Image (cartoon, grey):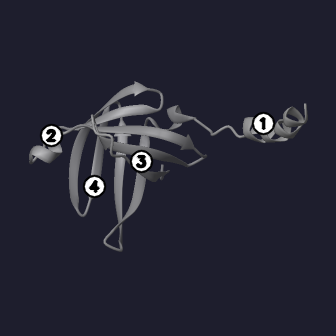
Amino acid sequence: MKKIILLLPILALVSCYNAEHNCKDFKNGKFKFEFEVNGVKKTTFFERKDGIEIETFDGKTDTSTVRWVSDCEYILQKKHPKNMAEEKAISMKILTTEKDSYTFEFGMVGSEEKQRGKVFKVE
């Protein structure tokens, strides 16, 4: 009985924590993603609308198709890949959302290797 009484406060705390998942709020819009490469901060801007994502990074613009698998998961596929690496689709999964941002996990489709990042809605 003591074990049950000791576990109740822990269970109450765990059950109160619900990560926000308002993924539909981020299906369309203008966004930015900041990340670091060799200690240098980089920013990419992209706009997602009606199954298309247009990304601008380092002065170059690329277009990808967006196929939503669920409200919080989608697959990105470059429309005009320039090499074999760009031909591979990328799996994107929104893990949590906030008012103007979301945390996500991404990786090549079929690969176990995943990375995480945070995207901010700019419009």
The amino acid type found where label 3 is placed reads: Lys
Going from N to C along the chain, the mark reached first, 2 or 4, is 4
Element type at mark 4: strand
Residue 33 place in picture, x, y as percent? 40, 56
* Residue at the spot of label 3: 30
* Residue at the spot of label 2: 87
* Residue at the spot of label 1: 11
- Left or right of 13 in this view: 94: left
Spatial separation of the CA atoms under disc 4 and disc 3: 11 Å
**Which residue is farthest top?**
70
Element type at mark 3: strand
Spatial separation of the CA atoms under disc 1 and disc 4: 45 Å
Disc 2, disc 4: CB below 8 Å? no
Say which residue appears at 62% left-offset and 39% top-offset: 20
Mark 2 residue crowding within 10 angstroms, few (<14) / some (14–19) / many (20+): few
Mark 3 residue crowding within 10 angstroms, few (<14) / some (14–19) / many (20+): some
Element type at mark 2: helix
Mark 1 residue crowding within 10 angstroms, few (<14) / some (14–19) / many (20+): few
Going from N to C along the chain, the mark reached first, 4 or 3, is 3
* Residue at the spot of label 4: 56
- Left or right of 50 in this view: 65: left
- Left or right of 118 in this view: 100: right
Say which residue appears at 47% left-offset and 32% top-offset: 72
Marks 3 and 2: which is nearer the front? 2
Spatial separation of the CA atoms under disc 3 and disc 2: 24 Å
Res 24 label: none
Spatial separation of the CA atoms under disc 1 and disc 3: 39 Å
Disc 1, disc 3: CB below 8 Å? no
Spatial separation of the CA atoms under disc 2 and disc 1: 46 Å
